[in-house]
Image (cartoon, grey):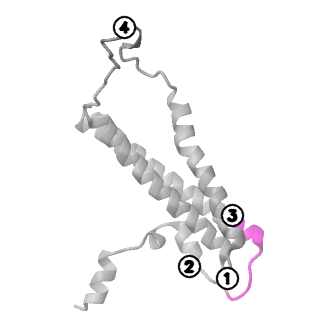
Amino acid sequence: MDTTIMEDAVVMPLRRVTLSGRLAQYESEEPEKISVVLLKGFTAVAFDIAIALGVATVSFLFFMGKLVAPYERGFYCYEVDSLSKPFYPNTINTYHLLSVSLGLPLLCIIFAEAIFFHSAKGTNKLRKYFAAVTFIFLEYVAAYTLGTFIMEVSPA
C-alpha cells in the first residue's frame, strides 16, 4: 500500500471535517454574491461551533457524571477568620459563566479576524475568514473543555 495514501488517511486536517473549512476550499468559476457567501459562512460557523459545543458538553457530562466525581473545595485561611469561607455551590450562575467564558472570546476572535480580513489580499477572502474564525474558536473550545476537566478532577 502506498505510504502517502496511508499518511493522508491517518492525518486529517480540520478543514476537511468542518463545514467552514470546506467552504474555504470551494472555488467557483463565477463570482457569488456577497450576501450568499455571508449566509453560507455564518451558517457553517454556527453549525461547526454548535457541534463542537455539543460534543464538549456531552463528553463533560458523561465524564463528570459517570466516571469521576468533581472535587469541591472551600477557601480557608486560618490566620484571619473573616477570610475563611465554606464552599457555596452555584455562587455564579452557569448561564452567565458560560456566556462570558465562551461568548466573549468568540467576539474577540471575530473582531480580530475581521481586522486581518480587511487587510488581507487574494481571492476567496471572505470564505477564509469564516474558516479562520471557526478553527481558532474550536481550538479555544478544546482547550476550555480540557481545562475544565482538569480543574474539576484535581484536588488542589
Crowd band around label 3 with a 10 angstrom C-alpha radius: few (<14), some (14–19), many (20+): few
**Residue kind at label 3, given as amino acid type:** Ile
**What span is colored magenta in the figure?**
29-40
- For the residues marked 3 and 1, what is the alpha-carbon distance in whole angstroms? 15 Å
The residue lying toward the viewer, choosing from 30 and 3, is 3
CB-based contact (under 8 Å), mark 2 and mark 1: no
**To which residue does mark 1 refer?**
122
Report if residue 106 lies within the magenta region.
no
3 or 1: tag closer to the N-terminus: 3
Identified by mark 1, the residue type is Gly
Could you say whether the residue bearing mark 3 is in a helix, strand or loop? helix
Q: Earlier in the sequence, mark 3 or mark 2?
A: 2
Q: Is residue 9 left or right of residue 88?
A: left
Give me the residue at 52% from left, 52% from top. 50
Q: Which residue is mark 3?
A: 115
User: Hey, what amino acid is under mark 2?
Assistant: Gln
Quadrant of the image occupied by residue 63: top left
- Closer to the chain start, of discs 4 and 2, is 2
What number is the disc on residue 69?
A: none
Drawn side of residue 91 relative to residue 42, left or right: left
Within-10-Å neighbours for mark 2: few <14, some 14–19, many 20+: some
**From this viewpoint, is residue 63 visible?**
yes
Give the spatial CA distance, label 3 vs label 2: 21 Å
**Residue 62 visible from this viewpoint:** no
Marks 2/1: CA distance?
Answer: 14 Å
Find residue 44 and report its horizontal and vertical position in percent: 59, 63
Measured from the top left, where is residue 62 in percent x and y? 31, 41
Q: Which residue is mark 4?
A: 81
Give the number of the mark in front: 4 or 1.
4
